[in-house]
Image (tube, rainbow, N blue to C red):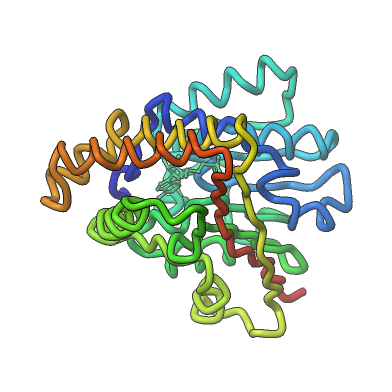
Amino acid sequence: MSKPYIHGHHSSVLRSHTWRTVENSCAHLLPYLTSPSLNILDVGCGPGTITVDLASRIPQGSILAIDPSAEVIEKARKHAQEKNVSNVRFEVGDIFDWKALDGVEEATFDIVHAHQVLQHLQDSLSALQVMKRLTKPGGIVAVRDVDYSACTWYPEIEGMREWLDLYIRVAQGLKGDPNIGKKLHAVAIQAGFERSEIETSVGTWTFSTPEERAFWCGLWADRTVQSSFKSNAIESGHATEADLQRIVETWRDLEGREDGWFTVMNGQIICHVKS
Ligand SMILES: C[S@@+](CC[C@H](N)C(=O)[O-])C[C@H]1O[C@@H](n2cnc3c(N)ncnc32)[C@H](O)[C@@H]1O
């Protein structure tokens, strides 16, 4: 079983995840939604807003979505019901324990998708190898992850570097890779894809208007002290309560700057499985 997810699933974290749609988080997948009857696996689906959006785009197809958190899977099921989307099945599950999943065998899916998941895994290579195995010949593996080291902001507020440095140290301490966005293609090569079978691209999220800054800076301020990130940072010895409080104030400062700007760089790969 994998390690608990760095942020946990506090409402300050889910505020970010439930904002996600296919358009704003996996537009790189749109050219591959070529048939209404695709069979998709969504790995680490979280509260499932991307999953349900994907399902509504393949009305004759089906999606299996897995996440180790029973709490978040319950939320995802509720979301699908509210949206009246029935061609999706949410199950508690771990990609490393895929043999325990009902209906999952090698070469089962047209698309195996993971959004913002590999960065959190202790063994992203094995996960990608499993994802490749579960994909049908001719299908694709699609992955998108942030590269924290490539996040950028304006103005250069004192404290933002402290936040980034702390986040990277805590994530690495949990054996994740917060800078994996730029290396996804390299992991895919190690997983057995040829370079010519891998398409790479970048997708960004930018938060600049007052509403966007309130959303992004506000959720980072809150998750710094309300989510599991707080205990992970303190118990690992990387930060004190006072350090975290300073970081909250830094995010509030950026939120209040009329000229504030924050951009997240996400690496994206589409890997083609040989026919
Ligand atoms: C950042 S969230 C992304 C959620 C969703 N894909 C999205 O973008 O909104 C990462 C998710 O990966 C899940 N996760 C962590 N380890 C996993 C594993 N071994 N197998 C499957 N999912 C895992 C976590 O529980 C968490 O919900």
Q: How many marks?
A: 0
**Residue shown at 74%/36% (left/top)?**
55
**Residue shown at 45%/31% (left/top)?**
218
Q: Residue furthest bottom?
A: 195
In the figure, 271 relative to 66: above or below? below
Q: Is residue 273 visible?
A: no
Question: Split into 4 quadrants, where in the image is the C terminus?
Answer: bottom right
Image position, residue 10 (x, y; %): 37, 27
Image position, residue 126 (x, y; %): 43, 67
Image position, residue 165 (x, y; %): 30, 59
Q: Is residue 55 visible?
A: yes
Q: Quadrant of residue 166?
A: bottom left
- Drawn side of residue 171 relative to residue 266, left or right: left
**Residue shown at 67%/15% (left/top)?**
82
**Residue shown at 23%/35% (left/top)?**
245
Q: Residue furthest front?
A: 258
The residue closer to the viewer here, 78 or 20, is: 20
- Drawn side of residue 165 relative to residue 183, left or right: left
- Drawn side of residue 124 relative to residue 82, left or right: left
Q: Quadrant of residue 144?
A: bottom right
The residue closer to the viewer here, 88 or 179, is: 179
In the figure, 39 relative to 19: above or below? below
Image position, residue 175 (x, y; %): 28, 61
Q: Residue furthest top?
A: 82
The residue closer to the viewer here, 94 or 247, is: 247
In the figure, 118 relative to 88: above or below? below
